Structures are given as structure tokens and as C-alpha cells.
Amino acid sequence: MNNKELEEQYQLIADIIESEGLGYALIEGGYIKTEMTDDPELKEAIEKAVEGCKTILKIVEPYLS
């Protein structure tokens, strides 16, 4: 994996975040997936972010309209 390929992966994910918002892009069939990158640190961060978003929604679900 070269730097150019990783840059393209990062740009794709950044574009999705800008257009969809991070939470929407991550959860419930979101657009950001661990398979989108070869960077192990980013893969782990995506996994943790998905779990974090799910936890937040679980906690605030009774307060959603």
C-alpha cells in the first residue's frame, strides 16, 4: 500500500463525512466501512466510532422525537 492509495482512501472518507455527517456515515448501513482502508489504525478507529455512536443512540433513544 503506498501513500497515494491511502491519501485517496482518506479523501473518500473525508468527503463522506462532509456530505453525510460522521454519525450518519458510520451507523445503520452507513457509508464508511472498515474495508475502505488498509490502515489498521483507521480500521480500529472506525470500529470504535461505530460502537460509540450505537451507545450514544441507545442512551438517548428515549429522548428522541
Image (tube, grey):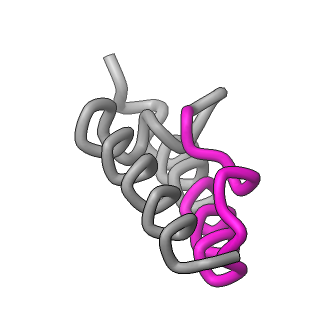
- Rendered view: 2 above or below 18: below
Q: Which quadrant: the C terminus?
A: top left
Which residue is pictured at 32% across the width and 43% down the height? 15
Quadrant in the picture for the N terminus: bottom right
The magenta segment is 31-50
Q: Quadrant of residue 27?
A: top right
Q: On screen, 28 above or below 52?
A: above
How many discs appear? Answer: 0
> Residue at image x 48%, y 33%?
61
| Residue that extends furthest to the left in the rendered view of this protein | 18
The image shows residue 58, relative to residue 31, as above or below, that is below
Q: Position of residue 5 (x, y in %)?
A: 56, 65
Going by the image, does 54 lie left or right of 40? left
At horizontal 66% and vertical 51% (from top left) the residue drawn is 36
Is 18 inside the magenta-drawn segment?
Answer: no
Most foreground residue, 39 or 43:
39
Residue furthest top in the image: 65
Residue 44 picture quarter = bottom right
Q: Position of residue 34 (x, y in %)?
A: 71, 56
* Secondary structure mostly seen in the magenta stretch: helix
Q: Indicate the position of residue 43 as horizontal and vertical percent values.
A: 68, 69
Query: Which is more toward the observer, 1 or 37?
Result: 1
Residue 45 colored in magenta in the image: yes
Q: Could you tell me which residue is drawn at 75 percent across and 52 percent down?
A: 35
